[in-house]
Image (spheres, grey):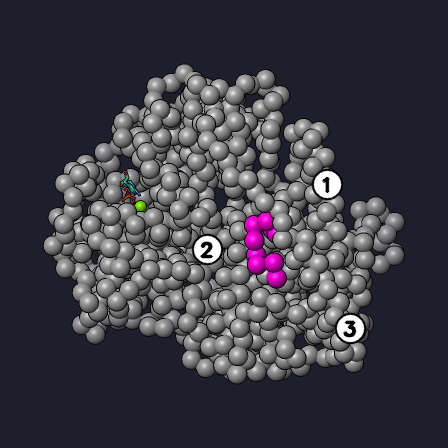
Amino acid sequence: PVNRTPEMQEERLKLPILAEEQAIMEAVAEHPIVIVCGETGSGKTTQVPQFLYEAGYSSEDSIIGVTEPRRVAAIAMSQRVAKEMNLSHRVVSYQIRYEGNVTEETRIKFMTDGVLLKEIQKDFLLLKYKVVIIDEAHERSVYTDILLGLLSRIVALRAKRRLPLKLLIMSATLRVEDFTQNQRLFTTPPPVIKVESRQFPVTVHFNKRTPLDDYSGECFRKVCKIHRLLPAGGILVFLTGQAEVHALCRRLRKAFPIRCSQPQEKEEDSAEGMRRFKKSRTRARKAQALALPQINLDNYSVLPAGEGDEDREAEMDDEEEALGSDLDLDLGDSEANEGEQPDASLPLHVLPLYSLLAPEKQAQVFNPPPEGTRLCVVATNVAETSLTIPGIKYVVDCGKVKKRYYDRVTGVSSFRVTWVSQASADQRAGRAGRTEPGHCYRLYSSAVFGDFEQFPPPEITRRPVEDLVLQMKALSIEKVINFPFPTPPSVEALAAAEELLIALGALQAPPKQERMKNLQVSQLSCPITALGRTMSTFPVAPRYAKMLALSQQHGCLPYTIAIVAAMTVRELFEELDRPAASEKELAELKGRRARVAQIKRTWAGQGASLKLGDLMVLLGAVGACEYAGCSPQFCHANGLRYKAMLEIRRLRGQLTTAVNAVCPEAGLFLDPKMQPPTESQVTYLRQIMAAGLGDHLARRVQSEDLLDPKWKNAYKKTPLLDDPVFIHPSSVLFKELPEFVVYQEIVETTKMYMKGVSTVEVQWIP
Ligand code: ADP
Ligand code: MG
C-alpha cells in the first residue's frame, strides 16, 4: 500500500494518465508488450511505474526497471516518484553511469538506457526485472533502439521459461509505426494505449521574419518583452548549447537583477600546482631511458577474464557537452549596445538547464521562484520532452538544435546548428500549456516552419556504429545485419564498423575471398575475438579500448588511461575563440588565449614528448590538474573546463576498475601524483596511440602540390579524402608540421581540421 500525502494525491488526480490506469493495467496483464503514447506532461514517466508497483509488479527479487535516454531524467524522475509515493530513495532509486542509490530494498529503478544495456551483457534474460519500461522511446537514442531490439527477443525467451517479462514502451509522439509496423521487431504488433492530453491551448506566434543568425539576441529581446508586458507565468527558452544558455542567463540576470551576493572565485593554488608539476617532470626526464623502444603489438597482456563490472554508456549528454567549440556564439555583454538599463523593479529568477548541469542545480527548476519574481528557465533540448517544468506559460523557441553530424564515408564529423523538426517544435510549444493556456513565440516564420522535417531521424542512422557492433558481437549477436533494429543503420555503416573492428583485431577476419563476398551480400558475421571481448568490457570507443588492451607494457597503462579518458570526454579546454562584445572582453580573451597556448606548450614539452603532440597536452593537463587536486581555481587559471576535468577523473576511475577486473596483476590505482612518462614511455605511447588510430593517418602534402595556396601546410588523408586536412591552430604541432601524423578525429568548421594530433614515424614502402 502506498501512503501518499493528500496534496500529492490531489495533484496526481489532475494528470490525464490517471484516467487510463485501468486500461493500461489490463493491457499489461494481457500482453507481454504494450505501448503507451501521450503528450509530454501527461504523467507517463511519473505515474506508470506507480501503477505497476501498486499492482504488485515488483517483489524482493524482481523489480520494475525504467530507462531514460538522459541522466537528468533518470535522477529527477526517481526523486519525483519517491516523493509522490512517500517512499525513500532506497526503494525508488536511480543508476547512471557513475553513480546511483540502488539498494537491496529497491523496487523501482530508474536508469539510463546504457546502464540497462550493460546489465544485459551480464544477465541476458534480465531475471532481476519483472517489468522493463523503455521511456522516451520517441527520442530514438541509439541505446533505446538497441534495447528494443534485444528486449523483443528477451521477452520471448522469458515467456518460454515461464518467467514472463513485461515490456512497456512509452513515447511522447504518436509516431509509433516504427515499433508497431515492424514485423521483425515485434511479430505481433503490441497494443497502443493513447493517453488523452489534457493540454491547455497554446497560441503559437510566428515571427514575420526569421533572424539570420543572432537567435540568442532575438531570444533576449523576446524574454524582455514578455517579462515587461505580459501577465505572470514562467518563461521557458530553448537554445542550442550550454555556452549559449549561460550567456543568455547572464544577460537576463543583468537586465532584471535580483539582489543577492555572488560568491567570489578564488585563484590560488594553481600556480603552485603548476610549478610542482613542472619540477617533478624535470626530475623524471633526467631519469629517463634512451634506448630505442618498441611496443609489442601482439602483447595484450590484459587477459580476457569474466566481464568488467562497469557501465558502458555513450550518452547524448556527453555529446551535447562536446558540442562546445566553434558554434557557440557568446553574447557577452552586448546588451550594452542596446542601451538597456538594469531594471531591479522587475526581478527575474533566471535558471539554466542542460544535461551536464549538476543535479542539485537542475532540481532548482522544479522549485517555485522566490516571492515576487518570475521564473525564466533557459534550456537546451533537455526541456523538450524529458522534464516537465511546472508553471511555464510562455515558451520562446529559437527553432534550432545543435547536433553532431558524421560523414558516412569518411567519418568526418561536424557540429551543426540546424532547424528542429516539426515534431520537436510542437513538443516545445506544448511545454507552455501544462497548467493554463499559454503562448509559444517561435523566432522564425511559418514558411520556415513549413520546410522543417516532420520528425528527426533516429540517432542510429546518423552516426558510426563500431561501438554498437562490438557490443552486439560480445552479446553473441554475430549477424548484426539480421538484428531487429526498429530502424536499421545503413549497410555501409555496418560494413565500415566491421572493417574497423577487424583491423583492430576485435573481430576475426574472414578468409580474404569470403570477405569480399561477405561485404557484397552484406552478411556481416565475423565472430568476436578474445581481444574483442576484452575490449568490449572497457567503457570507451573500440579504438581507445584497443589502446588500453596494449598498454600493460612498460608501465604505460596509467598514461593510456589518462589520455583515453581525456579523448573520450573531449573539449578539455574552454572555448576562447568566441567573438567578443567589447574592447575589454576582447583584451581579456586575447590574454587568456596567449596564456593557454603557453600552458599547452609547457605540457607538451620538448623533443620526444612533443612528438606525442596534443595527446601529450591531454596527459599533461590531466596530470597537472590532478596534482593540484582538480580544483575549479586551477582549471579556470589554466583554461580547463572544470566539468570536463571532473568527468575525466571519474572515467579514469572507471577505466582503472575495468582494467583491474580483466587484469588483476596490473594492480592499478589512481595516483594523484602520477609521474610524467619517461622518454621511452612516450615513444611507446605514440605506438599505442597509432595502433588505435592506424586508419587516421595523414601525410603532409609534398612540394609538387604546394603551388596551389589551398594546399599550404595541408595534409592528405588517403584513400578516403581528396580534400586537404589541416592541423588546427590550437594544436601544439601547428608550427611543427611533422610529415606523418595520426589524429583523434577530423572536425569540419571553416576547414577540415584534425584534432588530437600526434606524430608518427612511417617507414614508407612505396
Ligand atoms: P510525461 O512522462 O508524460 O511527460 P511526467 O510524468 O514526467 O509526464 O510529468 C507529469 C507531471 O508531473 C508534470 O506535468 C509535472 O507537472 C509534474 N512533475 C514531474 N516532475 C516534477 C517535479 N520534479 N516536481 C514537480 N512536479 C513534477
Ligand atoms: Mg516522460
Q: Is disc 1 placed on a helix, strand or loop?
A: helix
Per the model, the C-alpha gap separating discs 1 and 2 is: 34 Å
Query: Which circle's residue, 1 or 2, is located before the other in the chain?
Result: 2
Nearer to us of marks 3 and 1 is 3
Asked if the magenta segment contains residue 629, the reply would be yes
Residue at the spot of label 3:
286
**As shown in the figure, which amino acid type bears the numbered disc 2?**
Glu
Q: Which mark is residue 591?
A: 1
The N terminus, quarter of image: bottom left
Query: Which circle's residue, 3 or 2, is located before the other in the chain?
Result: 3
The yes-or-no answer for disc 2 within 8 Å of ligand 2 is no
Look at the numbered discs 3 and 1 and tell me whether their residues touch, using CB distance below 8 Å.
no
What residue appears at the point 29 percent right and 25 percent down from the top-left corner?
437
The yes-or-no answer for disc 3 within 8 Å of ligand 1 is no
Query: Which residues make up the magenta segment?
Result: 627-636
The C terminus, quarter of image: bottom right
Asked if the magenta segment contains residue 491, the reply would be no
What residue appears at the point 50 percent right and 53 percent down from the top-left corner?
318
Residue 373 appears anywhere in the view: yes
Residue at the spot of label 2:
315
Neighbours of disc 3 within 10 Å: few (<14), some (14-19), many (20+): few
Residue 484: x and y in percent read 37, 62
Neighbours of disc 1 within 10 Å: few (<14), some (14-19), many (20+): few
Q: Which mark is residue 310?
A: none
Residue 618: x and y in percent read 65, 60
